[in-house]
Image (cartoon, helix red, strand yellow):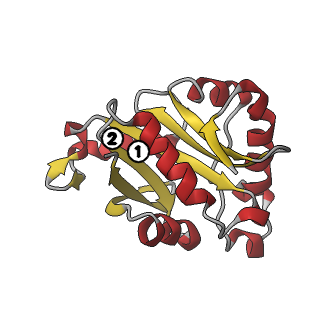
Amino acid sequence: MTFRRAAPEDFPGILRLQSANTIANLRPEEREEGFLSAEFTPEQIAEMAMDPGIIVASNAESVLGYLCGSRCDFDHGSPVLARMLESFDRVRYQGRPLRSYKTFNYGPVCVDRSQRGRGLLRGLYEALKREVAGRFEVGVAFVARDNPHSLKAHVAGLGMAEVGEFEVQGDLYVILAFKVC
């Protein structure tokens, strides 16, 4: 298994994984293993791959997982992300408002169902932290409150801290934060 920055030839594999794991494309029982809340266009994937980047987990044949990182000023067109960013003055991490840090957006992250539980999430996370070290201090993410699998993987599994919560159209989201170094 290789963890590396995504290249344009990886984009079809990223889009395939995204489509297979977006909430709208999953049966209720499949959602229990985690899900993606939204889909990105091929153009958005290409832009995110540039700065700070997308990390892929791959073998010789295909992309088996990916983790996106994006600047906080990247326009996802997402009301959920916009609401999270609006909270940065009031939400605190290690005693300081999130706004006071050099932050980047962590996510989305997706691992092929056949590869879950094999350490890919940890590998993607560590590779992204190495990629952004020196440019950012803190990574921030949001996870839907009704996605307990993802919350557990990020809080218990990776050690991210729950630092806040917000609501968009009746759905609750948790804000997670972590130190890059």
Is residue 157 or residue 85 the one in the foreground?
157
User: In the displayed structure, does residue 93 sit left or right of residue 120?
Assistant: left
Q: Residue at x 38, y 45 (%)?
A: 139
Q: Where is 132 relative to 33, above or below?
A: above
According to the picture, the residue beneath numbered tag 2 turns out to be 86
Task: Check disc 1 and give the amino acid type.
Answer: Arg
Residue at 62% from the left image edge and 58% from the top image edge: 120
Q: Is residue 170 visible?
A: no
Q: Are marks 1 and 2 in contact (CB under 8 Å)?
A: yes
Q: Secondary structure at mark 2?
A: helix
Coordinates of residue 126 in the picture (x, y in percent): 48, 50
Residue at image coords 19%, 38%: 100
Which residue shows up at 57% across the image and 29% down it?
48
Local crowd at mark 2 within 10 Å, few (<14), some, or many (≥20)?
few
x and y percentages locating residue 64 in the rendered image? 74, 51
Please tell me in which quadrant of the rendered image residue 68 appears: top right
On the image, the x and y values in percent for residue 33 come to 68, 71
Does 108 sit left or right of 24 as displayed? left
Q: Mark 1 — residue? A: 83
